[in-house]
Amino acid sequence: MPTIQKLRLREEGQNTLQREIWRKAVSSVTGVALPSLRSENGNPVRADEALEVAVGQLRNLTRDAEKFPLIRAENRSYGFQRNIYGIRWVARAIAFGVGLGVLAYMLWLARIDHQPALTLVNILALAASGGCLMMWWLLPSPERLKSAAERYAYELLQAAVVLDAEKNATPEAGQQQP
């Protein structure tokens, strides 16, 4: 999961300053002690389990759609991309089958006397099924799915920073301090 990858100390190519901010915030708001680099290297499976627990608790803390609208939006986007990617072969087969059906219908019409096969409706139906096939071939991709997952992970971890800031906020200026 991208959220776990972004919190791993052993993960290469990370912005280390951003990762430390996220790790501190996640640990603070969830109460889960995140593993050190030594712990991650010593037992990567156990370290990932600790990160999964922390991320799961963070997800529960950010379920309020009104307070965290970006998380909800990115989660919906990720779900949409995941579902589109999952059904891509079925959708491609349907679009291809519809195109073959329209071609077969046009060939059948061509064999019947006094029936034009190349009508505007038939050509538009063939173009529409071809366009759908192209769309289903080009749009669902692992890159789009990964990008949506990365955006969701980013927003979820940023929410941890917000929650941590709220948790550690100083008393308002209008209140008296002892």
Image (spheres, rainbow, N blue to C red):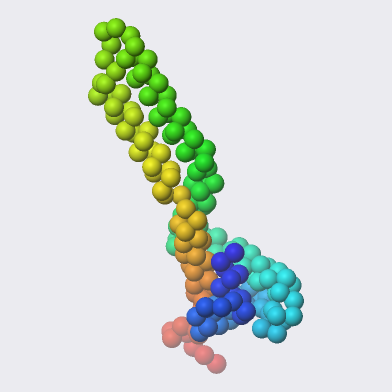
Residue that lies at the very extreme toward the bottom in this rendered image: 178
Residue 117 falls in which quadrant of the image? top left
Residue that lies at the very extreme toward the top in this rendered image: 113
Q: Is residue 25 visible in the rendered structure shown here?
A: no
**Residue located at (34% from left, 29% from top):** 126
Residue 48 percent coordinates (x, y): 68, 71
- Left of 43 or right of it: where is 64? left
**Residue located at (68% from left, 75% from top):** 32
Q: Is residue 79 above or below residue 1?
A: above
Residue 149 percent coordinates (x, y): 51, 61
**Residue located at (55% from left, 92% from top):** 178
Q: Please tell me which residue lies in front, 30 or 174.
A: 30
Q: Is residue 173 above or below residue 124?
A: below
Residue 71 percent coordinates (x, y): 48, 62
**Residue located at (29% from left, 29% from top):** 124
Residue 91 percent coordinates (x, y): 48, 38
How many dots with numbers?
0
Quarter of the figure with the N terminus? bottom right
Q: Is residue 134 above or below residue 28?
A: above
Residue 2 falls in which quadrant of the image? bottom right
Q: Is residue 143 above or below residue 157?
A: above
Q: Is residue 127 visible in the rendered structure shown here?
A: yes
Q: Please tell me which residue lies in front, 13 or 177.
A: 13
Q: Please tell me which residue lies in front, 59 or 48.
A: 48
- Left of 53 or right of it: where is 132? left
